[in-house]
């Protein structure tokens, strides 16, 4: 692995337009559960489709119950070594943009500006109205529910105090289109990159997984860092298997030695 990390460090040192693409494996080291892993959330629950959320009070109640169950993990999570390493690469002016499937805001908390983080699946940092877009903080929403996340019989899920529209965390749900502006920008940044590093992503969720493919097809040097193999490994110029935080931390250390 040391030779691979040294090679990656050299590539970063010679890069003018590095872009990093991050998935759930980037945040599991901060204590946030993933979705597809052996003990992932999708092994326990079928995702609630947006159409069901809109049409069924029971579906909304179950969706919110799960969100409140996982809320302490998000509230207590802090950036790990991988997030900090990427923030260092930004400070060193190598990293230009992060494209992320994650909704936890840990890249920004580590020190990367909002305008440099493209969130493909929205953010769980706040709640918004599906009709008018008004923003609500979690502290405004939690009192709506019982301590275990359930609702009292006959009570509906949170509604906007301005337009009475349904409230939902500002994330992209199943059956909901990815944000047009962010998705378009992600494809542009991928195509313009000279070094594209996918970190902690299964690269199985589409259309997001087509963004690294866009980088590779456009001639970017394509690197995958992940615990397990991915369907895009044959397309990559380099694959490093292991913990994201450890690999990225060692890479930054190598870069600092070579500067």
Image (cartoon, rainbow, N blue to C red):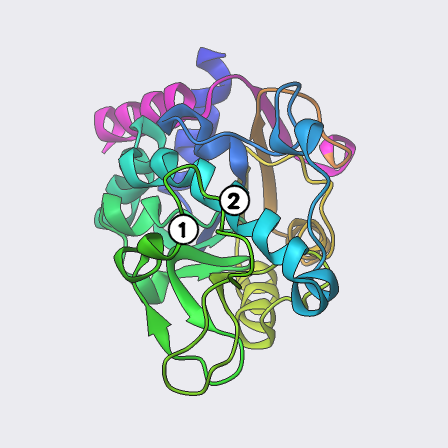
Q: Earlier in the sequence, mark 2 or mark 1?
A: 2
What number is the disc on residue 145? 1
Across and down, in percent, residue 103 comes to 46, 50
Which residue does the numbered mark 2 point to in the structure image? 65
Check the image and report above or below for 232 versus 91: above
Left or right: residue 100 versus residue 203 is: left
Foreground mark, 2 or 1, reads 1
Give yes or no for residue 155 being in the magenta stretch. no
Could you say which quadrant of the image residue 146 lies in?
top left
Q: Are marks 2 and 1 in contact (CB under 8 Å)?
A: yes
Give the magenta part as a residue range.
Answer: 233-259
Of the pair 33 and 9, the residue shown nearer to us: 33
Q: CA distance from mark 2 to mark 1?
A: 9 Å
Of the pair 226 and 140, the residue shown nearer to us: 140
Left or right: residue 138 versus residue 8 is: left
Check the image and report above or below for 1 versus 201: above
Neighbourhood count class around disc 2 (C-alpha, 10 Å): few under 14, some 14–19, many 20 upward:
some
**Residue 94 in view here:** no
Of the pair 132 and 149, the residue shown nearer to us: 149
């Amino acid at each position: 692995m040391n030779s691979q990390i040294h090679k990656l460090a050299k590539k970063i040192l010679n890069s003018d337009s590095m872009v990093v693409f991050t998935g759930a494996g980037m945040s599991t080291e901060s204590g946030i559960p993933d979705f597809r892993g052996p003990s992932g959330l999708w092994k326990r629950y079928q995702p609630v489709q947006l159409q069901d959320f809109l049409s069924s009070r029971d579906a909304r109640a179950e969706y919110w119950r799960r969100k409140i169950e996982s809320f302490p993990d998000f509230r207590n999570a802090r950036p790990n070594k991988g997030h900090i390493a990427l923030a260092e690469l930004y400070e060193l002016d190598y990293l230009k943009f992060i494209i992320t499937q994650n909704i936890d805001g840990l890249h920004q908390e580590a020190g990367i500006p909002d305008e440099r983080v493209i969130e493909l699946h929205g953010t769980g940092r706040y709640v918004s109205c599906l009709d008018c877009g008004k923003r609500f903080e979690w502290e405004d929403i939690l009192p709506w529910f019982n301590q275990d996340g359930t609702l009292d019989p006959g009570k509906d899920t949170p509604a906007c105090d301005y337009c009475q529209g349904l409230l939902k965390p500002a994330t992209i749900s199943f059956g909901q289109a990815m944000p047009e502006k962010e998705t378009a920008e992600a494809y542009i940044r991928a195509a313009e990159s000279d070094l594209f590093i996918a970190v902690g992503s299964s690269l199985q969720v589409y259309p997001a997984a087509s963004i690294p493919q866009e980088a590779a097809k456009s001639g970017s040097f394509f690197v995958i860092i992940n615990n397990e193999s991915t369907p895009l490994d044959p397309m990559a110029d380099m694959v490093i298997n292991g913990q994201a935080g450890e690999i990225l931390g060692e890479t930054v250390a190598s870069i600092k030695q070579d500067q």
